[in-house]
Image (cartoon, rainbow, N blue to C red):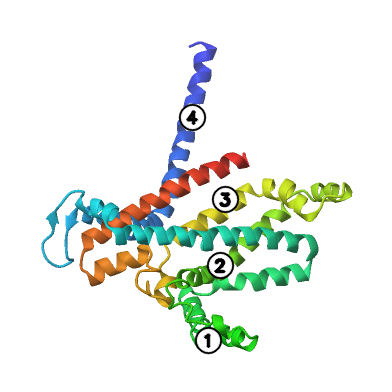
Amino acid sequence: MTPGDRTLALRTPRRISLLRGIRRDALVGWLFVLPALSMYALFVLQPLALTVQYSFYRWDGIGPATWIGLSNYATVLSDPDMRETILNAFRLVVFFSLIPVTLGLIVASVIHRVATGRLGAAARTVLFLPQVMPLVAAGIIWGWLLALTGLVNQFLTAIGLGGVTRAWLGDFDTALPAVGLIGIWVLLGFCIVLLLTGMTKVDAALYESARIDGASWFQELKSITIPSLRYEIGVCLTVTIIAALAAFDIVYVSTAGGPGKSTTVPGIQIYYTAFLERQVGLASALAVALTVLVLVIILPLQRLTRGSDR
């Protein structure tokens, strides 16, 4: 046996033992993941697969189901009421996503510039409180505030603007913006805290150099803050857009989709179609279409922000 063969013979058992160790570690890791993976498969993947399956049938939830192929999807695309619910969801994107992210960026920049130490920590805590409140509770509270005899109308009357008072959540023209106001209130704190956390990671020397050169607050925001926070802005947009497109709690508690169909969003329409109209297949098709719509919007956004971050 040559010296090379002896060396190979000595190394081979070590490699085998190393591979066995890696396989054993992988097996142990999968055993730890298995309970969570089982719950995820049972309560997320299985309902999702069943929803896709139901979308190809006409079914009332009780009797036998009838295969109808893509007819439910054709109804989703052609029915004016279905299309209107999706348009309402996109209108909520303005209130739930664009406004909170823009205001959050401005407020976070101001706090980062002027409020440091305990004052900044207190501001973050107060602004984040709506995010930890249950959405149902937020809807109920704002329902009281925006009622015809609510605190908002009382305040307007007290300052001489009694002529503009109305049932804000019961008016066809103001119901959707009023729901959007609730969304702004809930999501603004999340955006502020996330963006403010990202600002603390930006090199302070950049801001100091900009101030020495006489840069204004807006110039700092445009040239330093926004380019440095593209990933955090992407996360804010992702979370808030999903919240707008998949909205249910706030809308159901505050307006239940009314008046008429003015605040009916896909989540509300899915609920009514499945449980009140007993058209489980059509509701499932709308749910699948909503899922695809969310993915079509979110995946390019994620890729864009990750690419920008690199």
For marks 4 and 3, give the one nearer the viewer.
3
Residue bearing mark 1: 150
Q: Confirm or deny contact between disc 4 and disc 1 (CB under 8 A).
A: no
Q: Give the answer, above or below, for where 53 lies relative to 246.
A: above
Sequence-first disc among 2 and 3:
2
Q: Residues within 10 Å of mark 3 (few under 14, many from 20)?
A: many
Using the numbered discs, state the Cα–Cα distance from disc 2 to disc 3 in whole angstroms: 17 Å
> Is 48 positioned to the left or the right of 173 in the image?
left
Q: What amino acid is at disc 2?
A: Ile
Give the secondary structure at mark 1. loop
Give the secondary structure at mark 2. helix
Using the numbered discs, state the Cα–Cα distance from disc 4 to disc 2 in whole angstroms: 58 Å
Using the numbered discs, state the Cα–Cα distance from disc 3 to disc 1 in whole angstroms: 37 Å
Q: Residues within 10 Å of mark 2 (few under 14, many from 20)?
A: many
Residue appearing at x 77%, y 48% in the figure: 203
For marks 2 and 3, give the one nearer the viewer.
2
**In front of the other: 94 or 294:** 94
Residue bearing mark 2: 184
Residue bearing mark 4: 15
> Is 51 positioned to the left or the right of 130 in the image?
left
Sequence-first disc among 1 and 2:
1
> Is 73 positioned to the left or the right of 120 in the image?
left
Q: Position of residue 149 (x, y in %)?
A: 51, 89
For marks 1 and 2, give the one nearer the viewer.
1
Q: Position of residue 76 (x, y in %)?
A: 28, 55
For marks 4 and 1, give the one nearer the viewer.
1
